[in-house]
Image (cartoon, rainbow, N blue to C red):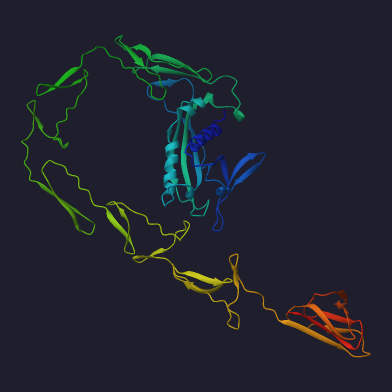
Amino acid sequence: MEILSTTITELNKLVESTGLFDKIYGLCKITKDATPKSVQQITEYQSSGQGSLITNYDNVNGTLAWLMRSPVTVSIAPVVNKVTSNDEVISINYPLRGIAVVKKDQLLCDNSTTGDQIAQVLLKALQGQNTAIKKLLSARSFRVNVVSYNTDVKELVRLETYATIQFDINVVIITSKDCLPSLCGESSASPCIFDIDLVNSEGLIVYSITQDSDNPFILADQPIVDGNGNPINIPYDPETPYVTEACSVVCADATVNVNGNLFDTVASGGTLNVPVEYENGTPVGSISGGIVEIPNPITCADATAVLKDTDGNILLTESIPSNVSLQLDAPDGSVTVNSVAFDTVPSDGSLNIGVRQESGSTQVGSKQGQFWRIDDSDISINSTPFDSVAAEDSLNIAVKDTNGTSVGSEVAGEWIVPAFEQDLVTRVNFDSGSALEYTITIDSDTAGTYSAASFGGSVTSATYEKNSVAASLPITVVATDTLKIIPDSDDGFVKLTGTY
């Protein structure tokens, strides 16, 4: 079983139990560092040289990925107390970095400390010894130490709607060298076997244990005798071994009395400290000729407790009898906004007042001197600055034509003004016997459209050519276009009308 992939898989199960993350990745790499105009890119390796870029932060409520933040270190594990091992025991330290991105608006605690609260949930889930993973890896010990965390990682997502947490952990695994897996996690040819000897304080072996990863030996409480032949029980735990001590004489416990009254017992050869204190915990008395002498009690006058605020104003005074404790509760403070009662806050507490827009969660305003001010809103028309309006004020923008008439209407969030059009009229007269065609060359900066024609005299119809190509009404012309009018007869006129 491959150690690192199994470790990350089991850590992800602990992370998943927090309920904060929809998408949890394995070991990833940073493929692009953040620049002033971009964010950090993290890629999860798949296979065959291919990877998957992690970018879908806004498609899920929470995302978590793992990075290796520095080289893995290996050292010889120290011998614990009096337990000796016949094989090579090593300590492997995996320095991992967790990267977490969580949408804050999906949580009940959407505030300035959301990231810290998420980090502490992860700390609670991961920190400490884990016996289940230790057994899964056939290890002597498995421990996660949370080293540090950072709740302001702008290199990942530069939006305040996300909590971005970078937390560093050390995964320390103590295991036998012979228990390390072969390449690609294939099983070893033989099971992982190591010997442990239990020795007493004189170095004599009192019990030997052969540990087999495939068929583990479970040692229940075993009756073992001490140096005097008295049975003792040794509960087996390789992480907290038991050490036997030789004893030549068995002695009864001594009895300790104070003023003739039984106080306690102490083992033979042991030491017992008898604390002599005032009721408030202050040590008192001295030893003189085998007697503990305590001075006569001191009579003290009543004390006066004075509770003040930070400006020195007296909030409360109370008389306190000598040798008596008294709790003084400071009154809550009142919070007003623009002289309107808003809330109360406990003494020495804090209260965050969220100033938001009329709808949504966007926070507005800034501290300016002793006031919290909301900036004016800038008004622009077609991206051109027009005016500004104070918060909660209104502004009417008059849209008129050159005659002073109000024009336009609201259409799908935009103010639409109808296009201004002028009539276009062209009349061509054909005298009797004149050529049956007439060509117009357009000289105008504005496009126009001929949409209808009327005829007079002997002319009853006409055909048209735009730029020497046959055309029919409506005909749109622009500068440099030519329009040839060909009547069906002379001695009459052709009148074209339209708009421009």
User: Which residue is at a point 52% across and 39% down the rendered structure image?
Assistant: 71
User: Which residue is at a point 41% across and 49% down the rendered structure image?
Assistant: 113
User: Which residue is at a point 44% across and 19% down the rendered structure image?
Assistant: 196
User: Which residue is at a point 34% across and 64% down the rendered structure image?
Assistant: 338
Residue 327 found in image quarter: top left
Please provide percent x and percent y for residue 313: 20, 58
Q: Quadrant of the N terminus?
A: top right
> Which residue is nearer to you in this view: 283 or 64?
64
> Which residue is nearer to you in this view: 337 or 258?
337
Judge from the rendering whether residue 126 lies leftward or rightward of residue 324; answer left or right: right
Judge whether 171 appears above or below 401 on screen: above
Please provide percent x and percent y for residue 410: 59, 69
Q: Quadrant of the C terminus?
A: bottom right
Judge whether 442 appears above or below 233 on screen: below
Judge whether 24 appears above or below 494 on screen: above
Judge from the rendering whether residue 442 lies leftward or rightward of residue 395; answer left or right: right
